[in-house]
Amino acid sequence: MTAPRSTKPRDRVSFDCDVLVAGGGPAGSTAASWLARQGRRVIVIERDQFPRFHVGESLLASVNDVFDAIGVSDTIRAAGFPQKWGATFMTADGVVERYADFSASGIRAPQTWQVPRATFDDLLLKHAASCGADVREQQRVIDATFDDCGVTAVVQARSECVERYEVRARAIIDASGRGSLLSRKFNLRVDEAAFANIAVFSHYSAVPRQEGRRAGDIVIISRNDLGWFWLIPISEELMSVGVVLPRGAAPDTPYEDWLDHAIAETPAVSRLMAGARREWPVRVEKDFSFSSRAYGGPRWLLAGDAGSFLDPVFSTGVAIALESGLEAARTAAACLDADSWCGAALRAFAKRQRRRYLSFRRFVVGFYTREFRELFFAPDPPRRMFRAMVTVFAGYWDPPLMTRAWIMLFFVLVRLRAMFTIAPAARSTLTGGNVEHPAVR
Ligand SMILES: Cc1cc2nc3c(=O)[nH]c(=O)nc-3n(C[C@H](O)[C@H](O)[C@H](O)COP(=O)(O)OP(=O)(O)OC[C@H]3O[C@@H](n4cnc5c(N)ncnc54)[C@H](O)[C@@H]3O)c2cc1C
């Protein structure tokens, strides 16, 4: 993928920084922290003033590897976020429960966190600054043009006192989230129409938690219309509660009523929410799944949601953002050192982004089918097969061969079930009666 050339004559030698990072969310902060710790000159342009609200509060265990790589583990531990050891999946009636215990999967550091994103993202961005990155908030990259030696980004500040200005860098990492600065510019975005779901959510107090070590875990409650609920304890008091419903479930009532209705018609959720009090406005996100035809090219790389994002059912977003932010940073450094943007490093980066996306996508597609859920919630699943799946749920999407074989077997069984079972159609008053999720097969 070749980036468009700038038509403007520029100073081709002097640079404001080595790498410009567009976006200071988890992907951008990670990339900036790693590069700055390597002694690279980094400028981060962030549109908002942190701390700011962001959806996506449940982390996977694999994030611990990235925290170590950018030297932020102690800071995260000291922040006192609720500890997450796994995920409880439950049927809509609450009768069947599957506990994905990350510590049973044999991974190095199974305990992770539930994070109010305002605090978490702010902490990561401050860490990037403390590593030496020049962080500029309330400014937006509005365009980037490329030439043989570098990239020229146009930056617009929110404040009227600051004029629009240019930043000259040797490379850019686009970590602008779902705004996808560069993939839109290069027309690379591939929307996943089948996952054009809608999420409605808020924060509640007085929601009971699980016992003991599981008190901080996420609870995922399946709905009969193939939608699902999340309950994430993000602080001692607050529970993030949200419902994801298939496309076509466009409400004709206010979102507040809609969320209340969804809670009321999902027995396992309504029991847990019986004494709950809503403490935040109800928020909505839609059409949030997409990938990219390319993840990097001459002097540019995509990280986190700027490259792709999948339906949040397995809480993969932040883990992917952190991992891909780190990979983008390492790739940028390798390409700058080699003074080449067509070598193995760039190809390996792109391949890894795509493989990770497809690996998680298989689970997401599966989760929106009845066969997957029936098998997943079936009594006594083979222990080794379930353990293999938990490894992926913990964020380790590229596990050893044996684990992959168990996962493959699970999907073969799902397929067989789909071929030989005639399931009754799911019903929901929110999605208008019989529902077949568009992602099905
Ligand atoms: C309903 C829903 C629920 C979710 N739940 C979870 C969950 O439980 N766990 C999980 O891990 N993930 C979850 N996610 C996904 C998660 O929110 C994202 O994957 C994650 O925030 C991606 O991080 P990022 O750094 O790539 O992007 P972001 O966090 O979006 O950060 C991008 C940053 O770039 C800035 N920006 C945008 N445009 C520009 C620009 N032009 N110039 C400069 N700055 C710019 C933005 O202000 C923002 O701060 C969920 C997503 C949805 C939609």
Image: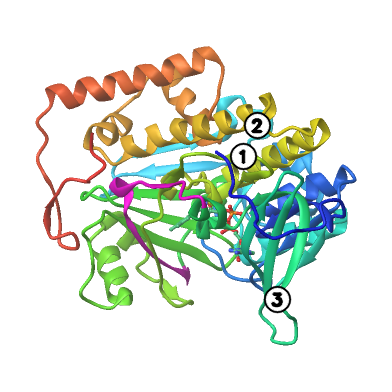
Of tags 3 and 2, the one toward the viewer is 3
Using a 10 Å C-alpha cutoff, classify the residue at mark 3 as few (fewer than 14 neighbours), some (14 to 19) or many (20 or more). some
The dot on residue 164 is 3
Q: In terms of sequence position, does the residue under pointer 3 or pointer 2 come before the other?
A: 3
Q: Which quadrant holds the N terminus?
A: top right
* SS under mark 2: helix
Rounded to the nearest angstrom, the CA distance separating label 3 from label 2 is 32 Å
Q: Position of residue 312 (x, y in %)?
A: 44, 49
Which of 38/260 is in front? 38
Of tags 2 and 1, the one toward the viewer is 1
* SS under mark 3: loop
Q: Is mark 3 within 8 Å of ligand 1?
A: no
Rounded to the nearest angstrom, the CA distance separating label 2 from label 1 is 7 Å
Which of 263/131 is in front? 131
* Left/right of residue 49 with respect to residue 288 in the rendered view: right
Name the residue located 77 percent from the left edge and 58 percent from the top edge. 10
- Disc 2 target residue: 346
Label 2 with label 1: CB-CB less than 8 Å = yes
Rounded to the nearest angstrom, the CA distance separating label 3 from label 1 is 26 Å
Quarter-wise, where is residue 155 in the image? bottom right
Q: Position of residue 49 (x, y in %)?
A: 68, 74
Q: Which quadrant holds the C terminus?
A: top left
In what quadrant does ligand 1 lie?
bottom right
Q: In terms of sequence position, does the residue under pointer 2 or pointer 1 come before the other?
A: 1
Query: Is residue 77 in view from this perspective?
Result: no
Q: In terms of sequence position, does the residue under pointer 3 or pointer 1 come before the other?
A: 3
Q: Position of residue 356 (x, y in %)?
A: 52, 33
The type of residue carrying mark 2 is Leu
- Disc 1 target residue: 297
Label 3 with label 2: CB-CB less than 8 Å = no
Question: Which segment is the magenta one?
Answer: 186-206
Q: Position of residue 188 (x, y in %)?
A: 46, 46
